[in-house]
Image (tube, rainbow, N blue to C red):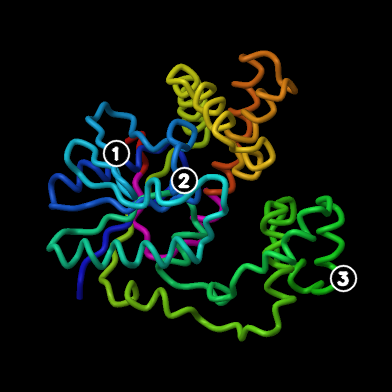
């Protein structure tokens, strides 16, 4: 069986740094597993660069860091949604290509849903997006979406965690799946290639207070690197503030800053730090359920 290395864990644990070191040692190439790093132009806010200094060359669909290829960067237009289905389809092709060239594929990232879809598949992965339905649902408030899902599928609502219940995108997708009765819900064939790999999962973790400190410093570093300028440039080039908010986390806060809802840079930093603390907690909850992971505490 072909070998596949996976490095997972919450944000700010140094996954990309470790992945680059291992790629150099074991003749590997990285495959980013992140729902926002797929978008062109979302570089600083999504943390495409590792903590260490590297020489970067950008290409279409990949970057090179110190000569190591990093795939699944810059594969989609930030103005349009790139789904988990798109990610799995593209990542499968990339991994297959890496193996054929005699190299070790190293999947690295913190988007748990994308990782699960890639490694195990999801029952609803093959159900396409219904643009007409989405256009209607996007006009509804969070409360209206919650009520709608409860009405059409109370069981599905009960199965959702609190984070999903507060996420309009997740609610819309759940309604879309339930209403799309024309498509038979079945396991997607997309993940079958991955299931033929011998997979080693390495997880990076840290005590919560250490994680928060690292997140706080990372936000300050990104502001200093030009994250606000990046957001201004994206908006100037046609990325709407509404779409920026849909991209979430840093970009939601940056949209408020550009619109003047947040006027003080220090306040912006505090808001972003709080948002990412919450995101890290959700990641920790998700990854606790991940099976067969060899965990390492980065503070040791």
Whole-percent x and y of residue 252? 64, 35
What range of the chain is rendered magenta? 284-296
**Residue 198 image position (x, y, % from top left):** 25, 71
Q: Residues within 10 Å of mark 2 (few under 14, many from 20)?
A: many
> In the figure, residue 161 lies in which quadrant?
bottom right
Q: Nearer the viewer, mark 1 or mark 3?
A: 1
- Residue placed at 17% from the left, 40% from the top? 67
Mark sitting on residue 39: 2
How many angstroms separate mark 1 from mark 3 (CA)?
48 Å
Mark 3 lies on residue: 151
Question: Per the image, is 285 magenta?
Answer: yes
State the image quarter where residue 298 is shown.
top left
Helix or strand or loop: what does disc 3 sit on? helix
> Which of 202 and 195 lies nearest the eye of the viewer?
195
Residue drawn 55% across and 28% down? 231
Q: Which residue is mark 1?
A: 58
Above or below for 28 versus 224: below
Q: Is residue 12 left or right of residue 197?
A: right
Asked whether the beta carbons under mark 3 and mark 2 sit within 8 Å of each other, the answer is: no
SS for callout 1: strand
On the rendered image, what quadrant is the N terminus found in?
bottom left
Q: Decide which of tag 3 and tag 2 comes sooner along the chain.
A: 2
Q: Earlier in the sequence, mark 1 or mark 3?
A: 1
Q: Is residue 211 magenta?
A: no
| Residue 77 sits above or below residue 300 on the image | below
Q: Label 1 crowding class (10 Å Cα cut-off): few <14, some 14-19, many 20+?
A: few
Residue 151 x %, y %: 87, 70
Q: Report x, y in % for residue 242.
A: 69, 40
């Amino acid at each position: 069986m072909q070998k596949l290395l996976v490095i997972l864990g919450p944000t700010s644990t140094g996954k990309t740094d470790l992945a680059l070191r291992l790629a150099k040692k074991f003749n590997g190439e990285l495959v980013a597993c992140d729902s926002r790093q797929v978008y062109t132009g979302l570089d600083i806010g999504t943390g495409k660069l590792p903590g260490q200094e590297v020489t970067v060359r950008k290409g279409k669909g990949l970057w090179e860091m110190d000569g190591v290829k990093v795939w699944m960067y810059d594969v989609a237009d930030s103005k349009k949604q790139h789904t988990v289905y798109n990610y799995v389809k593209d990542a499968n092709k990339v991994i297959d290509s890496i193996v054929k060239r005699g190299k070790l594929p190293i999947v690295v990232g913190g988007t748990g849903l994308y990782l699960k879809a890639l490694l195990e598949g999801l029952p609803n992965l093959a159900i396409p997006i219904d643009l007409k339905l989405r256009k209607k649902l996007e006009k509804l408030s969070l409360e209206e979406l919650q009520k709608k899902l409860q009405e059409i599928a109370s069981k599905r609502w009960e199965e959702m965690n609190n984070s999903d219940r507060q996420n309009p995108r997740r609610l819309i997708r759940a309604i879309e799946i339930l209403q799309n009765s024309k498509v038979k819900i079945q396991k997607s064939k997309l993940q079958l290639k991955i299931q033929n790999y011998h997979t080693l999962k390495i997880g990076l973790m840290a005590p919560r207070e250490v994680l928060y400190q690292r997140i706080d410093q990372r936000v300050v570093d990104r502001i200093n690197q030009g994250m606000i300028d990046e957001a201004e440039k994206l908006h100037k080039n046609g990325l709407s503030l509404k779409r920026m908010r849909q991209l979430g986390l840093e970009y939601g806060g940056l949209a408020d800053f550009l619109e003047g809802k947040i006027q003080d840079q220090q306040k912006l930093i505090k808001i972003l730090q709080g948002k990412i603390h919450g995101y890290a907690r959700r990641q920790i909850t998700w990854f606790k359920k991940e099976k067969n992971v060899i965990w390492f505490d980065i503070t040791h």
